[in-house]
Amino acid sequence: MASTSRIASRAAASAARSTSRQHLTATRTPLPALLSSKAFPAVVNAANNGRVGNTDRRTFSVSSSTQRLQRSTSAGPILTSSNPDHEKDNDELRSLFDAPPSSSSANNLRSSGPSTGLFEIPSLTSPQNFLILAQQTLARAQLLVDRIDRAGSADASTAQGVKELREVVRNLDRLSDLLCGVIDMAELVRNAHPDPEWAEAANAAYEYLCGYMNVLNTHTGLYSVLKSILSNHEIASTLSAEATAVANVFLRDFEKSGIHLPPAERERFVQLSDEILVLGRGFLQDIAGNDASDDFARNASAKPEADKEDIVEIPTHWLEDVNPTVLKAVRASAITDRDGLLTFSAADQPWVFQTLLKYAPDERARKVAFRAANYGSQAQVQRLERLLKARAELATLTGAGSYAEMALGDKMAKEPQNVEEFLRALTKHHRPRAAEDLDKLRRLKLTASTAGKKSSSTFNPSPTLPDFAPWDRDMYTEQHFRSPSLRSVQPLSPYLSLGSVFAGLSRLFSALYGIRFRASMVAPGEVWSDGPGDVMKVEVLDEREGARGTGGSAEGLIGTVYADLWSREGKPGGAAHYTVRCSRRVDKDDEAGDFVHGRAEDGRAVRPEDLGGQGYGNPLQAPTFEQREREGRYQLPVVVLMCDFARPGGGNQGPCLLGWHEVETLFHEMGHAIHSMIGRTSYHNVSGTRCATDFVELPSILMEHFVQSPQVVSVVARHHKTGASLPFEHLSSHLLASKSLEGLDTYHQILLARLDQLYHSTAASSPTFDSTALYAHLDREMHLPGARALSYTEGAHPQVRFGHLFGYGSTYYSYLLDRVIASKVWNHLFAQDPLDRQKGEVFKTQCLKFGGGKDPWHILADVLQADHIRDGDSNAMQQVGRWGIE
């Protein structure tokens, strides 16, 4: 059962949006200055929407080493299938995704006729039906709720009583699936649909059912019956390992909601949860550049000095050496420009300071710009600190020592001390690399400081490098990447058409897992944006598993991917993986029993025909299939990949040519999608990416390793005109350059992860809690030789720019943890041959197929053949930290 905090996490996504449907995703959240833009990629991605990055949401809530890069530069022959039909399908994929909007290819897979409904749900042919669907879903859910509640009074001495009790876990999972089936779909539609009427209807349905979930989170009857089952050995011993995992997830989520508390404390819990949501909304609105409207903002604006608080003054003579074009733009943006002095607003003009940090040679200008870029008003600091204190009080109510202790109980890390052990070990591992990277920049600063000066007649092979300040990093990083030795003179994009990459992914998965893609017909009304090629539908087929006899294929259908990859007005930026429907076994559902044992909210009996829909009143009517590899019928996963690639238009009739970062993004998101496809569990609540937050990024980060290997590059990178493979030496120089300061970037991410832990520790409960002082102390503790500081200077408040503190409170370490694990898995299984089918089967059958239904530490121990980490204790976390990111 999802906790109130999980509902708050869902709502946190909405809190960042204004009514004009502005979106704030994780990738667009500005971080403290000097932090890499790769800090916490998209997909841990979208700030807790119904997409990955929001894997912490349960039921009722909704890189490779330089050594590797320098090895073989032989691309080798393209990987092809011996089955001509498979290659024909791959060619069709390439043509489909490379087709310009006006081409016949973009329209060939669109059928005509009356609307079949969104996602082929018959009732969703118009936006007006969305709320009706939600209402029907709630009515159907009420029967399940009542049935589960009544099971608590079932007579365990009778066969019927035992049967009802044994059905409780499955019924809770059915309830979760029923509600999330509408909520997750509505979450996608309210974000992605270009028609405001549809978006508003989806939002109404979303909020309607989330309101009902708030009620379920405080339903003591559901909690009591679940707890009694788990404490009844005779019944609990009959549950499968997967069912037990599901039951424990529900129990933890209930207790995170404070449901076990006395009434007065439970009421306070709800009050704090509501307050945290409001505070988080204001926190994200400030970062997005929208004025918050809470008490902190109102009190601050009432003060006489409020209008002057964020004014920044920069003398024009400090900018004499700035590029004239850049300087012209900066001066044009000044609030005032007179008497040799420019004034700016720190709150409203962040781009000015980010520009000066990169391009102002005068250190005085950069120092002022750094403080301004990390500006935080008194109201912003107070809001953040109240948010952290409210979380601390919330944790205290549940009996936890800190918010981190409360939040980490169901994560791989388990407790804050383990996270600290991991981060300290990782700090020790990466500190030398970070120091080396810093010295690269210090040498550039030395060169700049001696330019134009009379050289000494005595050569000094080991000159003293200058101290490096936080405001130096952006400028010298820019110079570092502009150096001729790091420039990739060979263009990569001609080899990276979207169609070639997508078809290459199909070939890669076929080689690794026996899974491939096939373009599918889109029915009228099935997708949310119906322009030619706006949204493509792809079937996912498995050579040995999946649905029997679908489409006359010898393979089995295991799921569907909708690809919404083009940028368009009103669509969220960044990339995300949405789960619209999870896998679940359905043939054991006792739907008829819902009408025998369950009652409507008013206590009356209900017949299936009273609820509309078909069969037993299930509003969604999801198709189900018998499986070839196991008994039973299953509903299959449906996911959406969303990106914002620039679509060719106008006179450009060629394909979309991707940049390398966009290819990495597509591979990353496809890692989540394939996890959803392979993790077809019997229970909705542990299907695919519904696993621990600090484990869910492993498959997607692992995909980033694949795309950097010569063998895989030969599969996915083909010239869009000639078909020639991308010579790996062209890519190798690009990859080496992109990684040339990775040690320093990672070190800053470790600092942020440790800061997140500090802010959610017992320190937040102290009357003297000072978020700025804690930041300064940590920055000093993690100092590097030759650095005055890492990312803090007196007068700055960089913590108020750290948006992940709301969406990922106490779990910011997760991406670092999964980067370490992915490096280890890559080197253990795939580094020698990334197309090795045997190794692919190991990862498929020992990791991906379990979704969230198996302890992640047990998965890792099996995959890595490392029993010493199986317990996932403090020693295991330290060991993982010592592995480092290779």
Image: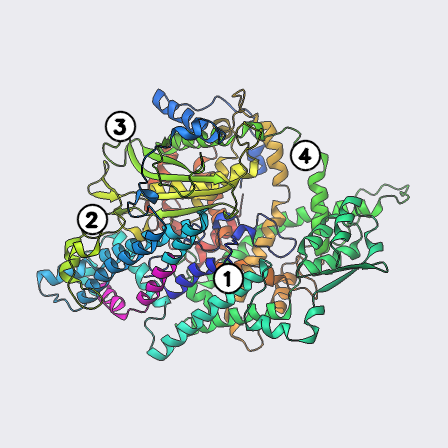
Q: Residues under labels 2 and 1: Cα distance?
A: 42 Å
Q: Could you tell me which secondary element the residue under label 4 belongs to? A: loop
* Pointer 1 or 3: first along the chain: 3
Label of residue 554 in the image: 3
Could you tell me how far apart the alpha carbons at marks 2 and 4 are, in whole angstroms? 62 Å
Task: For the residues labelled 1 and 3, say whether their Cβ atoms are less than 8 Å apart.
Answer: no
Q: Residue 806: which disc?
A: 1
Q: State the image coordinates of residue 865 (x, y, percent, origin top left).
A: 38, 43
- The residue at 60%/48% (across/down) is 37
Residue 173 coordinates in the image, percent (x, y) = 27, 55
Front position among marks 2 and 3 = 2
Q: How far apart are the two marked residues, 4 and 1, measured between alpha carbons?
A: 38 Å
Q: Earlier in the sequence, mark 2 or mark 3?
A: 3
| Amino acid type of the residue tagged 2 in the rendering | Gln
Q: Is residue 31 above or below residue 646?
A: below
Whether residue 13 is visible: yes
The amino acid pointed to by label 4 is Arg
Is 81 situated left or right of 45 in this image? left
